[in-house]
Amino acid sequence: MNAEKKNNLSGEGKANGQGEGMPRRTVLKALAGLPVAGVLGFEILKKKNYDINKRSSVVKELGLDSIDFPMSDYGTKKHSGDLIRVGIIGFGTRAVQLASALGFKHPDEVKSSQQNNTLAAWLEQEYLNVAITGICDVFDMHAEKGLATAANEIRPGGKDAPKLPVKRYRTYREMLDDKEIDAVIIATPDHHHARFATEAARAGKHVYCEKSPALHEDELNELYATVKSSNVVYQLGHQITQSIVFQQAKEVIKRNLLGKITLVETTSNRNTASGAWIRHLDANGNLKPGSEDTIDWKEWLGTAPYVPFSIDRYYSWTKWFDYDHGMIGQLFTHEFDAVNQLLHIGIPKSASSSGGIYYWKDNRDMPDSLHCVFEYPQHDLTLLYSGNLASSRGRGRVFMGHDASMELGNNAIITADRNSTRYADAIKSGIIETGSPMISFNPEAGQIDAVTSASEKYYASRGLTTTTINGRRVDVTHLHLREWLSCIRNGGTPSANIEMAFQEGITCIMAHKSYIEKRTVEWDEVNRKIV
Amino acid sequence: MKNTYSNLQLTALVLLRFLVGWHILYEGVAKLLNPDWTSAGFLSQSKWILSGFADWVTSNSGVLAAADFLNTWGLIAIGLGLLLGLFSRVAAVAGAALVFVYYLNSPPLVGIEYTLPMEGSNLVVNKTLIEAGALCVLALFPTSKIFGLDAFWAGRNKKSK
C-alpha cells in the first residue's frame, strides 16, 4: 500500500506545516457525522408524522379523537373523614388478600414479600384510614393469623396509622352486636353470605361481601329488601371492574364501536386440582391442619344440613351444593359482573344449563364441565358461559357485534369485522385492517394504541391482577375496597351495589336451578320470581 | 498512535461506526419520543443470569424509573458519540457493555424459551451480541480523530504539547 495514501489516526500529518489553524479539509472530515445525524433527524420527523397520521386516521374513523378518560385521583388525595373500624368474618385465603388490599399483612407475609421485592410497592399503596379491629373465624389457626395480621404495624400509613386493639369474636353474631365495629367484610364460604350480610345490614354495619351474594331465592330477596331499607353501603366483591381497561371498554360500548351486539361469550378455563377445588391436601399430599377441637364445626355448617366433621368439606367446600353453586358461584359470577357492568343487561328471560362430572370423579356435587345459555330477547342478545376444569386453553371473554368484536381480558382488543357495514369504506381503503386488532387499550399506558405492534398484541392476550393508575401498579381489590370505604364516608353508590348483586344472584340461581332440574328456567318479570 | 488505515479500511470502519451509531441513537430517541415506553416489558422477560436483577428493577418503581431514564439517555449519548465521533472510544466501550447487558438478559441459549417472538433464528449468537462485538471493534479501531469531532481534541492536544 502506498505510504502517502495511509491515514494517520492522530490526524497529525495533514495538520503539519499548515500554520496555526486546522486545514479546511481536516475540519470538514471531522464534521462528517453531522450530515448523517441530520439525515437521521429528518427520518425521525418523517416517521413521527407518519405514525401520527396513521393513528389519527384510525382514531378519527372510530370517533375516538375526542375521548377523555377521567384521570384518577388515586394517590393524590389525603384521606378524609373518620377512621373506619372493620371486622373481618372468615379469615381464610381470600381474607388474607383482602387484608393486604386494606393495608394489613401478616409478619410472615411481610418477610416473604421483602424477599421477593414486592414490599416497597405494597407500602406505597394508598392509606385507607381503616383499622381492622375484629376477626371472626371458627378455626383457631385462621383467627390467630387474622389477629396477627390486623395488629402488624408494618403497613401503608406507617407509624402514624392508629393502633387499635384487635378482638377475636367466636361467632358472627358477637361481632355484629359490638358497637365498636363500623363495617364488616364477609369472606366465608358462600352458604353464609346472604344471612351474614342481611344481619349485618340490620345491625347497621356496612357490608363488603365476597361473591356469590346468595344461594337461594328467598334469602336473596330478604337481603335485597334489608339493604334497600337500610342506610348501609353494600359492595359485592367483584374487583375486576376497577381495572382501568374496564373504563376504556365502557367507552367502546358507549360509542357503539362494536355495532349491534347479539352474542357475548364468557369462559372459565382451569386445569389443576386446586383450580377444581381439591384443597384439603398440602403440597406433600398430607391433610391440612384442622380438627373438631380447633374448628367450631356447628358454627361452620350454620344453616347447611348436618354432616359429620370432614376436613375435605372444610377446605374444599366448593365441591358441594350445600355450600355454594360450584363454577356458577365461583367463576361465572365474575363473568356476569363484567358483562353486566358494561351492557347493563340485568336478569335474563331464561337460563338453561348442562354439564357433568367428566374429569374430577371424586365425591363432588359440582360439575367440572358446565355450560349455560342465557337469553335476553329484550336486548336481542344471548349470553353464553362455558366453564371447564380439565383444560386451561384460554378462550377469553368476547363481545360480538356486527361491526367489530371486543376481547376483554385485562386488556381490551377490538377487531373490525370483515363484513362490517359501518367500517366497510375504511376497510376498503385500507385504513382499517380486519386481520389484526383495530385498536387495543393497553392498561399499562392508558392510551389508545391504534398501531398495534407485535409485542403489544402479545401483552394484550395476558391477564393481570393489577392495573396501572398514573404510572403506578395498583391491586384492583384495593381499589374496590377503596370505593366501598369512600361511599361509606362520602355517600354514593358503589359499582357492585345491591341492585347489581340482586341481578347477579338471580341469574346464578336460575343457572343452578336449571342444571339441577334439567330444564330451562324463566324469570317472571311481573312477579319478580323464578319459574 | 502509529497505526494507519488504508482509505478503504477507514471508509469501512467509519461506515460501521455510522451504522451502529444510527441504530443506537434511534433506539434512544424512539424511547424518548414514546411517553409510555418502559423497560418493564423487556425486563419481565429476562431469563438466565440477570433475571434476579431484572426482577429487582421491575418490582421497584423508583429503580425502574431510574433505569428507564439512564437507558434512554445512555443510548442517545452513545449514539451521538458514535455518529459525531465525539468521545467515540468511551461511547463504543460503554455501548458494547450496555448492549452486552441486553444480550445477557435474553440470550438465545438452548433450553431458554421466550414467550415474546424473537427476530430471526438465533442460536447462542444473535444480532445484539454481534452489535456488542462490532462496538468492541470500533473501540479498538478508532476513526473519530479523522472523521469526527475528536479531531478537534486531537488538534488541541497537539498544540498544547
Image (cartoon, rainbow, N blue to C red):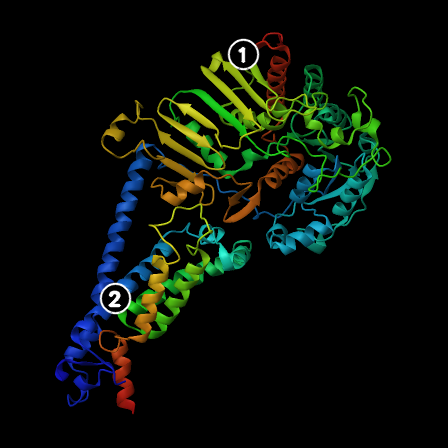
In terms of image quadrants, where is residue A16?
Answer: bottom left
In terms of image quadrants, where is residue A38?
Answer: bottom left
Residue B16 marker: 2
Is residue A516 rendered to the left or right of residue A166? left
**Seen from this angle, which residue lies furthest right?**
A293
Quarter holding the C terminus of chain B is: bottom left
Position of B76 relative to A118 (above/below): below
Q: Which residue is mark 1?
A: A349
Front residue of A70 and A50: A50
Front residue of A523 and A284: A284
Question: Residue A416 appears at what percent x and percent y?
Answer: 34, 29
Front residue of A372 and A417: A372
Position of A109 relative to A168 (above/below): below
Q: Secondary structure beneath disc 1?
A: loop
Position of B46 relative to A396 (above/below): below
Output the chain of dot 1.
A
Question: Residue A330 appears at what percent x and percent y?
Answer: 63, 28
Residue for point 51% across, 45% down: A468
Q: How many marks?
A: 2
Quarter holding the N terminus of chain B is: bottom left
**Label 2 amino acid?**
Leu
**Label 1 amino acid?**
Lys
Residue for point 44% across, 20% down: A263
Front residue of B158 and A365: A365
Q: Is residue A226 visible?
A: yes
> Are labels 1 and 2 on one chain?
no
Question: Residue A89 appears at what percent x and percent y?
Answer: 75, 34
